[in-house]
Image (cartoon, rainbow, N blue to C red):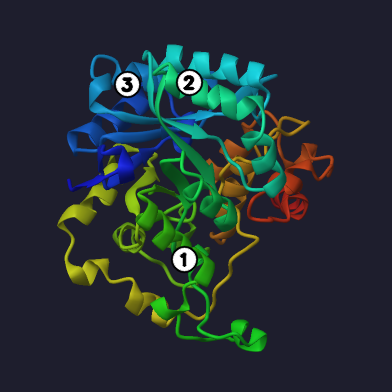
């Protein structure tokens, strides 16, 4: 495993990390197996944005006795209320959630205290000008948080963070589908059937962001490196071609300021597939040749199963419904296991009341109501 300096923090982190989002759907033993394999292969940084109590407890049990081997990104503003995840800037709710995080992870500090999920200017202004940011700074002053970070999908918010002077790490969604644009300013050409999706087509704002982060010593830890696994499947990829985990990792790790790509793993074998990057050949890492011949590209409207659409008033696990819908539509017939999993959900797409609150919260502007209708029709 190669290790990189985490910006001006001075911490040395594994360039491949552990993103915790898929761990919510695994039991204690399965989480322990994934964490153990990650540790065996040299991974030393993990992100826990999830507020769900069970997953926090399972991660805590998995790292118990060797907490010192891990750098933990824990989020401030991710809370659990009425059995669901919520994002909040309410200091009292944040205090309860952060105390719970420490207790369940069996630790008295978090290495990287991440201001959770700011994607809008109004939310930035609310968080940075009031009691919320004072609480974050208090956590650092008392040693409960060693460094302050932020998570965002928004390039402009990320730039504000990099230029703030007090944010050391940005958890940012980064992969070729989010970065690359056709090398043209002609809107008609943008929607052309074919184009040369080379590095010269990187969105200028995102390219500038990476340079600013590097100049200011602000590290980027990457989320959505595989695009919610969509980039690994030609049928679901916005490029119409499949990339490998190694190619996705190489793309992210060759951006300025990137210190680690935090990958979600469903099983230990997925850890092996990611860490294979460390011994991959240059040919195996070559993503540019694949993208150069890609027939199409799309930025928005693609569900990455991030879960930021919650909470749902009907308690639908929207991300899981979307994932199962996508899995089902890639097959001639719905796989029995997928249908069984769907039917086992506490609430399904049939329970959707089309209130639209999820669409307001979705950072990728997915037409969730439409997808719920399609999932209802597909699964019955």
> Which image quadrant is residue 105 in?
top left
Element type where label 1 sits in the image: helix
Q: Is residue 176 visible?
A: yes
Q: Is residue 198 visible?
A: no
Q: Secondary structure at mark 2?
A: helix
Which is nearer the N-term, disc 3 or disc 1? 3
Q: CA distance from mark 3 to mark 1?
A: 39 Å
Q: Place residue 349 in its image quadrant.
A: top right
> Picture coordinates of residue 66 (x, y %)?
23, 19
- SS for tag 3? helix
Q: Nearer the viewer, residue 164 or 346?
A: 164
Residue 103, image x, y percentages: 44, 11
Q: Residues within 10 Å of mark 1 (few under 14, many from 20)?
A: some
**Viewer-side residue, 323 vs 164:** 164
Which residue position is annotated with label 3? 62
The residue beneath circle 2 is 139
Quadrant for the N terminus, please. Answer: top left
Q: Position of residue 158 (x, y in %)?
A: 53, 51
Q: Residue at x 19, y 38 (%)?
A: 42
Whether residue 20 sits left or right of residue 377 in the image: it is: left
Mark 3 surroundings: few (<14), some (14-19) or many (≥20) residues within 10 A: many
Count of labels in the image:
3
Tell which tag, 3 or 1, sits nearer the viewer.
1
Q: Which residue is mark 1?
A: 208
């Amino acid at each position: 495993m190669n290790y990189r300096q985490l910006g001006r923090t001075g911490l040395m982190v594994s360039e491949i990390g552990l993103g915790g989002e898929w761990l919510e759907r695994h039991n204690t033993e399965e989480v322990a197996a994934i964490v153990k394999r990650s540790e065996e292969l040299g991974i030393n940084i993990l992100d826990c944005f999830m507020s769900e109590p069970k997953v926090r407890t399972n991660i805590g049990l998995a790292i118990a006795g060797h907490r010192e081997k891990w750098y933990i990104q824990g989020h401030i503003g991710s809370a659990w209320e009425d059995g669901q995840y919520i994002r909040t800037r309410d200091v009292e709710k944040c205090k309860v959630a952060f105390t719970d995080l420490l207790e369940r992870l069996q630790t008295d500090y978090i290495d990287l205290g991440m201001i959770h999920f700011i994607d809008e200017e109004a939310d930035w202004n609310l968080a940075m000008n009031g009691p919320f940011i004072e609480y974050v700074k208090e956590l650092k002053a008392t040693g409960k948080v060693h460094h302050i970070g932020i998570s965002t999908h928004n390039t402009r918010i990320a730039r504000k963070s990099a230029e703030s002077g007090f944010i050391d790490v940005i958890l940012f969604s980064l992969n070729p589908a989010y970065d690359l644009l056709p090398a043209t300013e002609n809107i008609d050409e943008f929607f052309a059937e074919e184009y040369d999706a080379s590095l010269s087509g990187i969105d200028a704002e995102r390219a500038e962001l990476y340079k600013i982060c590097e100049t200011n010593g602000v590290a980027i830890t990457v989320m959505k490196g595989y695009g919610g696994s969509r980039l690994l499947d030609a049928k679901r990829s916005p490029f119409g071609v499949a990339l490998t985990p190694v190619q996705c990792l190489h793309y992210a790790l060759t951006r300025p300021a990137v210190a680690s790509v935090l990958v979600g793993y469903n099983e230990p074998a997925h850890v092996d597939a990611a860490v294979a990057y460390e011994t991959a050949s240059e040919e195996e890492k070559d993503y540019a040749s694949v993208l150069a011949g890609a027939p199409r590209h799309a930025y928005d409207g693609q569900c990455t199963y991030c879960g930021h659409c919650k909470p749902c008033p009907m308690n639908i696990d929207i991300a899981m419904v979307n994932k199962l819908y996508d899995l089902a539509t890639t097959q001639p017939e719905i796989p029995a296991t997928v249908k069984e999993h769907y039917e086992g959900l506490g609430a399904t797409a049939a329970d959707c009341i089309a209130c639209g609150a999820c669409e307001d919260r979705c950072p990728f502007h997915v037409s969730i109501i439409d997808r719920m209708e399609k999932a209802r029709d597909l699964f019955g």
